[in-house]
Amino acid sequence: MPRYRLTVEYDGFDYVGWQRQENGPSVQGAIEKAVLSLTGETVSIRGAGRTDSGVHAMGQVAHLDLTRQWKTHTLRNALNAHLALAAERVSILDAAEVPPEFDARFSALRRHYLYRIICRRSPLALEARRAWWVPKTLDHEAMHAAAQHLVGHHDFTTFRSAHCQANSPLRTIDRLDVTRSGELIEIRATAQSFLHNQIRSFAGSLKLVGEGKWKPDDLKAALEARDRKACGPVAPPEGLYFMQVDY
């Protein structure tokens, strides 16, 4: 039974998240329905990460097993045709045959995320569902300096959701950079894995630093508190993008 790796792009606004759920449409469910329409097979696909409702992806990775061999470009194009017919905001960027031991989730070495903030007085029109609008200027240099306190191996209890199902709050952040280009501030994060709401928690707390309400050392103190109550407000989902997975 051949196994295929899919690289997936999606607009998460109209979905309850990646994972199939009873309370609304999911990205996973959309792809599984497209596979069923194409092949007649009911499959369960596994993704590299479970993005929340409203979170987007430019490089989510998933795998699935099919009973017959497919040319990879044919599989990609056919799945996209069925997704388009269903008016899904999901696109298969690439399909590749992989060894049977490949697992989109457990084979991942690093995951890369981007969080986008647009700072301007006027509300967003074109980017309203694709960035966090902050109607004031933020000090991105102070935000970057503060972010470096979060790089490395730490107990991130402060920055994970109360609903997080991970066995441990310990994670290693390889990169957490804050840059600015005009009105756009980008927060880029890299780690082998993240906790539930971890990046949005980072972004919300870093905004407090950018506003001058927190100093960089206040972010360090929040980390060391190991207490969810020490976290700043969680940033909204529309600014978050799952960018890439390294294998």
Image (cartoon, rainbow, N blue to C red):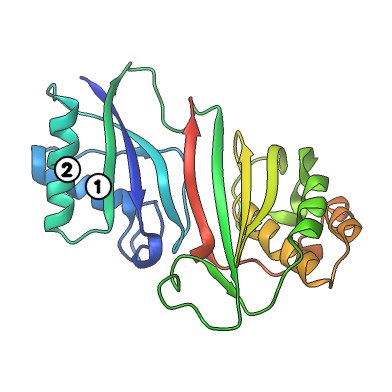
* Residue under label 2: 79
Res 180 seen here: yes
Quarter that holds the N terminus: top left
User: Could you classify mark 2 by the number of other residues whose Cα lies within 10 Å: few (under 14), some (14-19), or many (20 or more)?
Assistant: many
Q: Mark 1 touching mark 2, by CB under 8 A? A: yes
Q: Residues within 10 Å of mark 1 (few under 14, many from 20)?
A: many
**According to the image, label 1 marks what residue?**
31
**Amino acid type, callout 2:** Leu
Residue 44 % position (x, y): 28, 39
Residue 219, above or below 212:
above
Which quadrant of the figure has residue 86? bottom left
Q: Which mark is residue 176?
A: none
Foreground: disc 1 or disc 2: 2
- Residue at the image position 72 percent from the left and 44 percent from the top: 169
Is 53 placed above or below 10 here?
below
> Which x, y percent locates residue 128?
45, 74
Q: Position of residue 79 (x, y in %)?
A: 17, 42
- Residue 219: image location, x then y, percent: 84, 57
Q: CA distance from mark 1 to mark 2?
A: 8 Å
Between 179 and 200, the residue placed more toward the observer is 179
Q: Is residue 163 above or below residue 96?
A: below
| Residue type of the residue flagged with mark 1 | Ile
For this orientation, the residue located farthest to the bottom is: 122
Of residue 50 and residue 81, the one placed in the foreground of this image is 81
Label 1 vs 2, first from the N-terminus: 1
Q: Secondary structure at mark 2?
A: helix
Q: Is residue 162 visible?
A: no
